Image: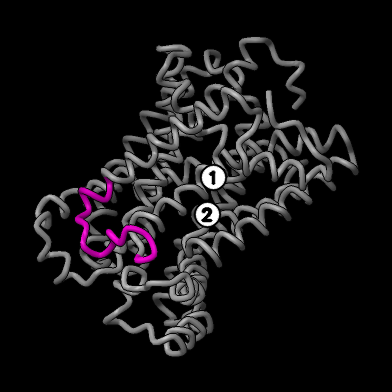
């Protein structure tokens, strides 16, 4: 896509709405990830039930599974797919040189993700995004119908895989689990101290030891959760949205947005209730049943969030709400990595040490404060600079030259 060919209104919608959606996704990801940063997710049930906030925390946990868990990573993945469509469109115009730039960009993102995974937080998603992004050029000449069919197949495929695993008893992640257990034994990480290790650690060495085994836990999550297929399916759906410039003429697609919002809520909300019930009760309908609940709750609700924000934008126009969301969205990489730094400083023993004894309701309040600090930082930073700090470094490494940072 050549942005110079867009109308002024189209250019405004392209930047404001996509950045605002990305900013909203960052907020949801912050709310989803901070229970792990705070170590609340790792605590045993008896410890959680003895907290002063246990009653409200259980309600909050249900609401988190219903409205947050997986929904904002879905939105973030769709936006990555849209972004890739723009990058690939430019690469097609520039032919071979453009594709070299694209693959270099993905390679650098892969390195950034690896550093994030190994030295800051085991919940990194950037490595998977970079690896999946490398496959996107293979779909650049596929028809729109082919993209939609491929996306649907990839999003539904994990259900079939989980049914097969449930019936066969095969454990694809068994080698990764053995490696994780090896490092736990090596460093003395046990079931009893797992939830407190990062709080009790007084040096970064102990944090790094936990991150090493955590990297294998993350690989296990990707394998058992069939995450590559899900991300690739969402990328293709985002690629379809971007290639057809649906974001560049929102008013023309108002009826489509309304249908996506209504159908997304109609399907997603009931299944989100089932998904929350299944997650809170240790999957009583088995792995396959939980996979069905996840698929038909997370993806429709993610699409409903996207279309709902677009409809709100059409009704309200560019106002302070959307400008506020757009600021952190323009610095998504910086703010995503920044959330990991905040999590370490606030909850780990090498920081303020608030982890492992903070109720979920307070954890989410802290996450909200962190996001608003990032929002203010992004607004003031972008008042003077053209890019976020990590975005600037990423661009310079991609193009191999120094780029102007100050406006």
Q: Earlier in the sequence, mark 1 or mark 2?
A: 1
- Relative image position of residue 231 (x, y in whole percent): 55, 52
Q: Nearer the viewer, residue 148 or 269?
A: 269
Residue at which label 1 appears: 77
Name the residue nearer the viewer: 349 or 212: 349
In this view, the mark in front (1 or 2): 1
On the picture, is 260 further left or further right than 366?
Answer: right
Is the stretch drawn in magenta largely helix, strand or loop? Answer: loop
Judge whether residue 137 can be spotted in this image.
Answer: yes
Q: Position of residue 169 (x, y in %)?
A: 42, 82
Question: Which residue matches tag 2?
Answer: 230
Give the position of the N terminus as an image quadrant: top right
As helix, strand or loop, the secondary structure at mark 2 comes to helix
What span is in magenta?
A: 349-364
Above or below 296: residue 225: below
Identify the image quadrant of the C terminus: top right
């Amino acid at each position: 896509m050549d942005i110079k060919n867009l109308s002024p209104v189209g250019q405004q919608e392209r930047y404001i709405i996509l950045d605002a959606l990305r900013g909203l996704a960052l907020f949801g990801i912050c709310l989803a990830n901070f229970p792990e940063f705070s170590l609340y997710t790792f605590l045993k049930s008896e410890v959680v039930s003895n907290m002063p906030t246990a009653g409200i925390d259980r309600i909050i946990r249900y609401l988190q599974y219903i409205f947050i868990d997986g929904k904002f990573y879905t939105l973030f993945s769709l936006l990555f797919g849209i972004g890739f469509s723009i990058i690939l469109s430019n690469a097609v115009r520039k032919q071979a040189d453009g594709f070299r730039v694209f693959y270099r960009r993905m390679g650098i993102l892969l390195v950034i993700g690896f550093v994030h995974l190994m030295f800051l937080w085991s919940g990194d998603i950037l490595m998977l995004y970079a690896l999946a992004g490398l496959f996107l050029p293979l779909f650049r000449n596929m028809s729109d119908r082919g993209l939609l069919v491929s996306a649907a197949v990839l999003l539904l495929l994990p259900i079939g895989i989980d049914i097969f695993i449930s019936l066969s008893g095969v454990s694809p992640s068994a080698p990764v689990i053995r490696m994780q257990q090896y490092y736990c034994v090596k460093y003395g990480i046990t079931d009893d101290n797992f939830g407190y290790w990062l709080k009790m650690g007084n040096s970064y060495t102990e944090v790094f030891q936990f991150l090493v085994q955590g990297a294998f836990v993350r690989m296990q999550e990707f394998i058992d959760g069939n995450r590559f297929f899900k991300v690739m399916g969402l990328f293709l759906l985002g690629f379809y949205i971007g290639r057809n410039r649906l974001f560049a003429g929102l008013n023309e697609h108002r009826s489509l947005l309304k249908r996506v919002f209504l159908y997304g809520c109609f399907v997603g909300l009931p299944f989100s209730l089932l998904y929350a019930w299944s997650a809170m009760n240790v999957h009583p309908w088995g792995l396959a049943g939980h996979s069905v609940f996840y698929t038909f709750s997370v993806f429709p609700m993610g699409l409903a969030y996207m279309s709902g924000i677009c409809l709100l934008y059409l009704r309200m126009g560019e106002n302070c709400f959307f400008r506020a969301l757009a600021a952190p969205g323009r610095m998504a990489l910086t703010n995503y990595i920044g959330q990991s730094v905040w999590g370490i400083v606030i909850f780990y023993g090498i920081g303020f040490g608030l982890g492992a004894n903070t109720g979920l309701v307070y954890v989410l309040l802290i996450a909200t404060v962190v996001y608003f600090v990032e929002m203010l930082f992004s607004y003031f930073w972008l008042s003077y600079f053209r890019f976020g700090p990590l975005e600037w470094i990423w661009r310079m490494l991609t193009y191999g030259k120094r780029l102007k940072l100050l406006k």
